Amino acid sequence: QVQLVESGGGLVQAGGSLRLSCAASGSTFGINAMGWYRQAPGKQRELVAIISIGATNYADSVKGRFTISRDNAKNTVDLQMNLLKPEDTAVYYCYVGRREYSYWGQGTQVTVSL
């Protein structure tokens, strides 16, 4: 089992910045992907950014504004979000892929106001 603890999030005006952090603990050996998804009201959960072995991927909607970083030694993954827009408002979930299993954080709310 992998436990995920998220921090960050909150309310920010459009154009502002926020940083999300996620720390993984437990059976962390063999983690092959760490990233962030988000879910807005009435919409499906969608990929925001993910770092897997040899690759980093971003949703088109956040490219150039968000940066994902991962510390393998600490088993953490951060998401720096700049130039936030109201459409970035959502619950953001930390994701960890370990072998054939997926693990999710509890979610943290990000609200971007005009």
Image (cartoon, rainbow, N blue to C red):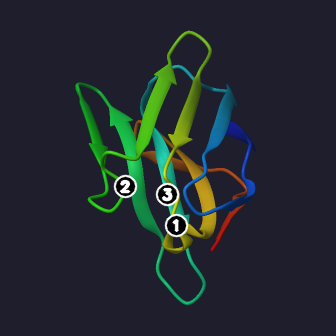
Q: What amino acid does circle 3 point to?
A: Tyr
- Local packing at callout 1 (Cα closer than 10 Å; few below 14, some 14-19, many 20+) is many
Instruction: Name the residue beneath numbered marker 1.
Output: 88
Hey, what amino acid is under mark 2? Val
Q: Callout 2: helix, strand or loop?
A: loop
Quarter of the figure with the N terminus: top right
The residue under the point 51% across, 66% down is 85
Query: Which of label 3 and label 2 is nearer to you?
Result: 2
Quadrant showing the C terminus: bottom right
Task: Confirm whether residue 46 shows in the render.
Answer: yes
Whether residues under marks 3 and 1 lie with C-beta atoms below 8 angstroms apart, the answer is no
Query: Which residue ends up furthest to the bottom in the rendered image?
Result: 42
- From the top left corner, tell me how far across and down residue 49 is, in percent: 39, 47
Report which residue position mark 2 lands on: 62
Dot 3, how many residues are within 10 Å of its Cα: few (below 14), some (14-19), or many (20+)? some
Q: Residue furthest left?
A: 54
Amino acid type, callout 1: Asp
Picture quadrant where residue 97 is located = top left
